[in-house]
Image (cartoon, rainbow, N blue to C red):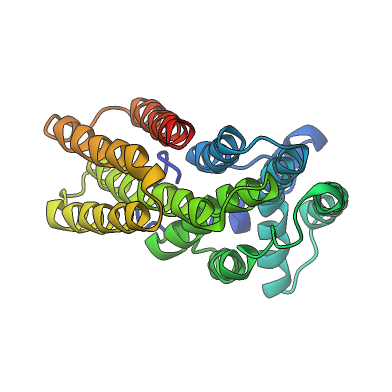
Amino acid sequence: MDVARTPGRRDTAPATRSTSAGPRSLLRSVAVPAEHGGWGLTLEPVLLGLLVSWSAAGVCVGLGALLAFLSRTPLKVMLVDTRRQRLLPRTRVARRVFAAETAVIVAVAVGAAASAPPAFWIPLIAIAPLVGLELWFDMRSRSRRLLPELAGAVGMSGVVAIVALAGGSDARLAFGCWLILAARSITAIVAVRDLVGQLHGDHPHPLFVMGADLCAAIIVGAATLIDRATALGALGVITAIAVQRALNLRPAPRAVIIGIRQTLLGLGIVAATAIGVLWS
C-alpha cells in the first residue's frame, strides 16, 4: 500500500528510471522499496505472531518475511527488464542484491525449520499464489492496480500464521489471526486509495469503500467463529473502520498524514488482537 501514488496509475517507474545515476542512488533504486505502507503491512503480522507465540523460530520467520519484502524490489526490476529483453546496469545490481537477500532468506528458513513444529510452513500453500499474482503484475509494471495490492497484502498477512505456528500455537488461532490482519489490509488499502485519489483530483467512491468495509467485517466475523480469542482483534478492525469513515468526512489530508493514521490503526489492531489472545 503506497499512499504516495495515484490509485490505478500504471507503475512505470522501474522502466523509466534513469540508469545514469551514481552507484549509491542506483543501489537505492533497486534495493529500497518505494511502498512506504508496505513496511507496516509486513511488520504487523510479524509483530502479532511473536506477541501471540514468541519463539526463536518465529523470529527467524519474521526476519525472512522482512527480507522477502525487501527482495521484491530487486526482483521486480529483474522481472521487468527480463520481460523487455534488456540488460541494464540496474539489472546487474538488482541480481546481486536479490541473490544476497535470497541467501539470507534461505539461511533463516533453515534456522526456523530446525526448531519449529513440522507443519509450521503449511500457510505458504495459500500465500504463494497470492504473492505470485502480485509478481505477475509487477512484471508488467502494473503493481499499483488494486488487485495485486490486495493479493500481496493478504498474502503477507499470512506470515502471522506461520510465526504463530512456529511458536506452537493452535492452527485455528493462527488462521484466525491471519483473517484479522487480512481484513485490516482490505479496508485500509481501499480507504487509502480513495483518499489519495481525492488528493489527485479524483471523485470519492464511497460505495466502493463501504463494500471493502463490509467485506472486512464479514472476514473478522469468520475469524471470531474460528477462534473466539480473536474477538477483541475483530472489534479492533471494526473500530478502525469507524475511525476511517469519521476521518473521511473531512477533506483528504496530506499523504504522510494518511500514512501515519494507518500505522497507528494497524498497531492498535495488533495490540487488541494480542491482548484478546493472551487474556483468553
The image shows residue 222 at horizontal and vertical percentages of 32, 59
> Total number of numbered labels?
0
Residue in the picture at 49% in, 51% down: 173
Residue in the picture at 74% in, 74% down: 85
Residue in the picture at 68% in, 44% down: 167
Q: With 204 as the anchor, is 273 left or right in this view?
A: right
Q: With 53 as the anchor, is 258 left or right in this view?
A: left
Q: Quadrant of residue 78?
A: bottom right
Residue in the picture at 14% in, 32% down: 246
The image shows residue 74 at horizontal and vertical percentages of 72, 52
Indicate the quadrant containing the C terminus: top left, top right, bottom left or bottom right.
top left
The image shows residue 189 at horizontal and vertical percentages of 36, 48
The image shows residue 114 at horizontal and vertical percentages of 87, 51
Q: Residue furthest front?
A: 280
Residue 115 visible in the picture: yes
Q: With 120 as the anchor, is 56 left or right in this view?
A: right
| Depth order, front residue of 220/199 | 220
Q: Is residue 67 above or below residue 226?
A: above
Q: Quadrant of residue 199?
A: top left
Q: With 196 as the anchor, is 69 left or right in this view?
A: right
Q: Is residue 267 above or below residue 34?
A: above
Residue 11 visible in the picture: no
Q: Quadrant of residue 191?
A: top left
| Depth order, front residue of 137/156 | 156
